[in-house]
Every structure is written in structure tokens, then in C-alpha cells.
Amino acid sequence: MLEIQGLNAWYDASHVLHGVSLTVEAGEIVALVGRNGAGKTTTMRAAMGLMPKVTGSVRFDGHDLLALPAHARFRLGLAYVPEERRIVPGLTVRENLQLGLVATSGKIDMASAIDEIALSFPRLKERLDQQGMTLSGGEQQMLAIARAMIARPKMILLDEPSEGIMPVLVEEMGVLFRRMRDAGITLLLVEQNVEWALKLASRAVIIDQGEVVHESSAAALLADRAIQERYCAV
């Protein structure tokens, strides 16, 4: 589904990613883990077309993405939930969800799509006419995920979805991600909550100082405390 080869990325003169390569198969949950500042978010931003300078290869569902802007990648079925959520102030939950359909050019009926997404997010269903910014942190995270899901993407890039969320909502989120996988949505998950991410994922990739340094099954990494301590411990 997603194939990244030899990916380099820069912020101005700062060379952040150094030849990153990873793959995500259709129907997988893959965890991308590592310390803060290791290059996880930059990898996602580069895959989504949000970095100012990138070289290498990014292919998604058979398409070469490197020359495409972010909205064109979205139309191919690649969605992104950023760490900072980006709920739009002044808009209701319903209106924030509607923003997720703007780039679909009317191909998806808005009313039915909102009804459909509300079934997966009962907390949001009760708050469709509430201002998005008045939701709790966990509910805002659910809204950001729902806004990405509403356009029925093939794959979602999730950046730190459990950050700042109450444990009960983190568990709900894990159930949701498994349902998404079972429904055919592929997930690439960046997480500081390494144990939680590895229990969700089938495979794991560790990035350190802008380079991939380890790849294995998630179960193998979960059992390998030495590797976790070396590359993931704060």
C-alpha cells in the first residue's frame, strides 16, 4: 500500500531524514516508534507531501507521490491525522467533519457520510452541533480521526493519537483502530506509547536520528526490552 525508499527530507538547511525506507502492506497496522525528535513526524509529513524539500521515492497504491501536492495524495486515498489535531475554531463538530469531504469534490453525499461516521463515534454523534474546540482533548482526537475517515480513505497516517488522552479513551481508540483495520483501512501509527502501539500493530519500525535502525514483528519488539531501552526510552 505504501512504499518509501531512500527518503531524505530537509527543514531549510537542516537534513532531518537520511535515506528512510519502509513499507506498509494493505490491511496492516504498522507502528513507527522512536524517541522524540527521531524523525517520525517528519516521515509522515514527507509521505503526505507537507515537507518543503524531499528526495527519494514515495509510492502509494501503485502511484508515485513525490511530485504530487498533499490534496492530490488525499484524493488517491491517503489521509493524515496530525499530532496537533487542528480542529477548526468557530466550527461545530458537524462542520469540522464536513471539511473532510471538501477535497472529494461532491463524490460522497455529505449527510449520509456524517450519519455513517457517527455510528463509529457515538461520543461525536451526541455533539454534532457543539463547537469542536469545546470538546475534551480525547473527543477532539476522535473528531480529528473521524474527519480523516469520513472520506473513506484506503490508508491513514496517525501521529501520536494517544497523546494527552485519558486511559479509558486510549482503550476505546485501540478498539476503533482494530475495527478500521478489519474494515480494510491500512494504518501507519506514530506513537510514544510504545507498548500500546506494539499490541495494536502487526509490524514495527524504529527510527533514530532520521534513520531506520530496526524492523521486526511488533510482538518481537514488544518482547525485546533491550532494543526498546536503546531506541525508545526517554
Image (cartoon, rainbow, N blue to C red):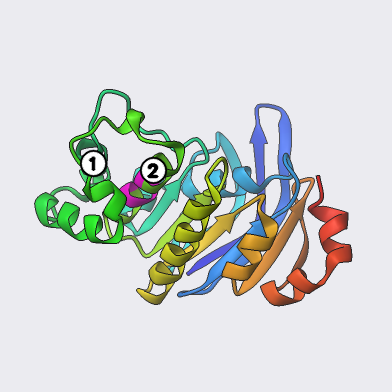
Give whichever of discs 2 and 1 has the lower sequence position: 1
Question: Is residue 66 in sight in this rendering?
Answer: no
Q: Which residue is disc 1 drawn over? A: 127
Q: Which residue is disc 2 drawn over? A: 139
- Numbered circles on residues, count: 2
Q: Quadrant of the C terminus?
A: top right
Residue 150 location (% of width, % of height): 27, 54
Residue under the point 65% across and 42% down: 9
Majority secondary structure of magenta residues: helix
Left or right of 111, for residue 203: right
Q: Is residue 168 magenta?
A: no
Residue under the point 85% across and 65% down: 225
Q: Quadrant of residue 205?
A: bottom right
Residue under the point 65% across and 66% down: 198
Question: Is residue 12 in sight in this rendering?
Answer: yes
Residue under the point 39% across and 67% down: 180
Left or right of 83, for residue 73: left
Left or right of 84, for residue 75: left
Residue 127 location (% of width, % of height): 23, 41
Task: Rate crowding at label 1 as few (under 14), some (14 to 19) or many (20 or more) other CA atoms within 10 Å.
Answer: some
Q: Which mark is residue 104?
A: none
Residue type, mark 2 in image: Glu
Q: Is residue 197 above or below residue 193?
A: below
Instruction: Look at the image and give the residue range highlighted in magenta.
Output: 143-147
* Secondary structure at numbered mark 2: helix
Residue 87 location (% of width, % of height): 36, 33
**CA distance for labels 2 and 1:** 10 Å
Between 228 and 62, the one nearer to me in the picture:
228
Residue 209 location (% of width, % of height): 79, 45
Between 41 and 145, the one nearer to me in the picture:
145
Residue type, mark 1 in image: Arg
